[in-house]
Image (tube, rainbow, N blue to C red):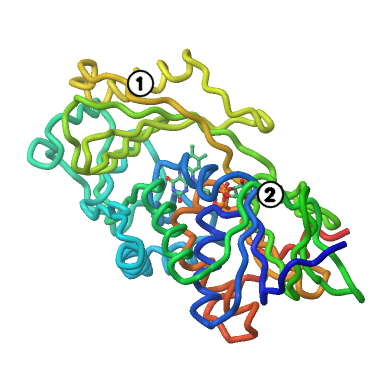
Amino acid sequence: MQVVKAWDAIIVGGGIIGCSLAIALRKKNWRVLIVERGEPGQEASHAAAGMLADFPLELPLLLRKIAAASARMYPEFVHELRDESGIDPDLREDGTIQLFPADCSEPRQGLSRLADLSGVEPTLAIGDLQAFLLEECSVDPRALTSAAVQAARHRQVDIASGTSVVEVVIAAGQAAGVRTDKSSYGAPVVVNCAGAWASQIGPLRIPSKPVKGQLLSMVGGPALRHVVRAPGVYLVPRTDGRLLIGATLENAGFDKRTNPEIIQRLRAAAIQFVPPLAEARILEAWAGLRPGSPDDLPILGATQIPGYFAATGHFRDGILLAPVTAQIMAGLILGEPHAHDISAFSPLRFAE
Ligand SMILES: Cc1cc2nc3c(=O)[nH]c(=O)nc-3n(C[C@H](O)[C@H](O)[C@H](O)COP(=O)(O)OP(=O)(O)OC[C@H]3O[C@@H](n4cnc5c(N)ncnc54)[C@H](O)[C@@H]3O)c2cc1C
């Protein structure tokens, strides 16, 4: 086996999680290599809607604290990526209108009910649902991820694209690098950030699973100011005039094809809430694979192999959780204290 160059850390997967962590480690002067099977930032992080949904009712109990922390980090995260890449991730801070059925019993303390939508979101038709305004933001995940890839390059993170990691190399019981389909790379720290594909990398099985989401974008309709989240559908406006409509949650393996009937169903659901959208046209339809896990919680931390870490399983919230994940994982890898208890997310909870 020929080892080409040594790094302090190798990150497997160049999605938003891998790139954010690479930047965090680079800031500590670590030499970092991202090994990416395709082109960085073209999988789940490219497919996402971009809601920064830290609203507690949207999240498992155990995620709420780190989700809130990550949402607080976002303005600075975006500012830095924009500065270093010249790409604007389109952080929108107008808020989210969450619609609940009138008879919904979920607690809504602290939420401000919108009795009259005409001055707030005039094209929204909510029937007998109730509307609440949340302070949640959104970003454009494609721009965000491109910015993160650019910023990583700018900070001299090395990126090996088009090469698939097959397994983590172990020497004397410790991580020593990765073997790919083409070559090998050496480092005493390896972090599995391979998203829905994390389970395919040997020798340990990190139990990620793909959860497919289909969505579409429309142009030429009314300009919404807010994200709108309704039962069964959400609408996410972009500043460039696109409106994203999503999304399905499907167990369909690694299939990323879209189904025209499902896309039309999502479109019809959106028109029900914003009737003038009937005049808009579909720009694009696509599907992506969320990195799920057996208990729907992220998989973050050290594995049973010294030097081998996992940062995946972010499921529906990986865009939101990117800044806090990078902070937590960098702290853990560097042996520095960090503010969060991540024991519930340990990869060891799945160890046999
Ligand atoms: C339809 C949809 C809507 C979503 N909406 C939101 C949202 O509104 N808000 C939110 O916060 N999150 C959302 N998400 C979730 C979010 O997109 C993910 O949680 C997040 O992008 C995960 O990032 P990642 O870097 O772990 O994975 P990915 O972006 O998938 O990156 C993993 C990378 O690893 C690479 N890779 C895989 N195997 C190997 C290998 N063997 N060797 C080398 N490289 C490998 C892949 O090619 C890929 O580039 C959504 C996801 C989908 C699909």
Q: Position of residue 58 (x, y in %)?
A: 45, 49
Q: Position of residue 222 (x, y in %)?
A: 16, 29
Give the labeled residue for mark 1.
Answer: 267
Q: Secondary structure at mark 2?
A: loop
Q: Decide which of 174, 347 is in the foreground and name it.
A: 174
Task: Please name the residue shown 19% across and 25% down the image.
Answer: 221
Give the labeled residue for mark 2.
Answer: 163
Using the image, determine if residue 192 lies above or below residue 182. below
Give the residue type that dot 1 points to. Arg
Q: Decide which of 338, 194 is in the foreground and name it.
A: 194
Q: Is mark 2 within 8 Å of ligand 1?
A: yes
Give the residue type that dot 2 points to. Thr
Q: Is residue 49 left or right of residue 209?
A: left
Using the image, determine if residue 283 lies above or below residue 150. above
Quadrant of the rendering where the N terminus is positioned: bottom right
Task: Please name the residue shown 52% across and 61% down the image.
Answer: 19
CA neighbours of label 2 inside 10 A, class few (<14), some (14 to 19), many (20+) = some
